[in-house]
């Protein structure tokens, strides 16, 4: 996912790595290990993520259908959790203040990110 001149990638070991695409270095400029999310959901693998427009929040989903809001300004702590999904998330998209989520059960759910 592009963030201006940065590229963020979700890795299998529950890490989000941020790369500077203008730099010649191939090492990440940020390596974010979301320990809080792992502890909260028994080490379930992260499957999807998206970033808010202001780039202050990440939204990450795991294989069990849990979606977490992670605050980038507060040392990547969990700021909230979205409820109502019990199956794997197939895709997530953020539009204005809405988070659209499609899960394996075939439903499209739309959350307001301000009220969760």
Image (spheres, helix red, strand yellow):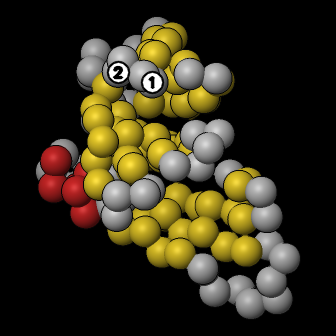
Q: CA distance from mark 2 to mark 1?
A: 5 Å
- Note whether 82 is above or below 8 in the view shown: above
Vertical placement of residue 79 versus 3, above or below: above
Q: Secondary structure at mark 1?
A: loop
**Residue nearest the viewer, comparing 36 with 102:** 36
Q: Residue at x 46, y 16 (%)?
A: 112
Q: Nearer the viewer, residue 93 or 97?
A: 97
* Residue 86 tag number: none
Mark 2 lies on a secondary structure that is loop
Q: Nearer the viewer, residue 91 or 32?
A: 32
Residue 63 x/y as whole percent: 34, 40
- Tell me what residue is drawn at x 52 percent, y 49 percent: 56
Percent position (x, y) of residue 61?
40, 39
Indicate left or right for 8 with 81 as reference: right
The residue beneath circle 1 is 113
The image shows residue 42 at horizontal and vertical percentages of 15, 51
Can I make out residue 10 in this image? Answer: yes
Q: Tell me: 12 left or right of 30.
A: left
**Percent coordinates x, y for residue 30 in the rendering:** 53, 75
Discs 2, 1 touching: Cβ within 8 Å: yes
What residue is drawn where x is 43% and y is 68%? 32
Q: Is residue 103 left or right of residue 35?
A: right
At 49% across and 63% down in the image, what residue appears?
16
Q: Quadrant of the C terminus?
A: top left
Q: Which residue is mark 2?
A: 116
**Residue 113 horizontal side relative to residue 34, left or right:** right
Mark 2: give few (<14), some (14-19) or many (20+) Cα within 10 Å. Answer: some
Label 1 Cα crowd, 10 Å radius (few <14 / some 14-19 / many 20+):
some
């Amino acid at each position: 996912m592009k963030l201006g001149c940065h590229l963020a990638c979700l890795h299998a070991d529950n890490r989000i790595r941020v790369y500077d695409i203008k730099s010649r270095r191939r090492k990440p400029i940020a390596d974010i290990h979301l320990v809080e999310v792992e502890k909260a959901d028994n080490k379930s693998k992260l499957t999807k993520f998206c970033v808010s427009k202001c780039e202050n929040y990440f939204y990450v989903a795991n294989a069990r259908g849990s979606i977490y809001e992670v605050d980038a300004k507060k040392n990547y702590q969990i700021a909230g959790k979205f409820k109502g999904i019990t199956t794997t998330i197939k895709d997530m998209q953020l539009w204005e203040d809405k988070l659209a989520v499609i899960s394996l059960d075939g439903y499209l759910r739309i959350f307001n990110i301000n009220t969760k």
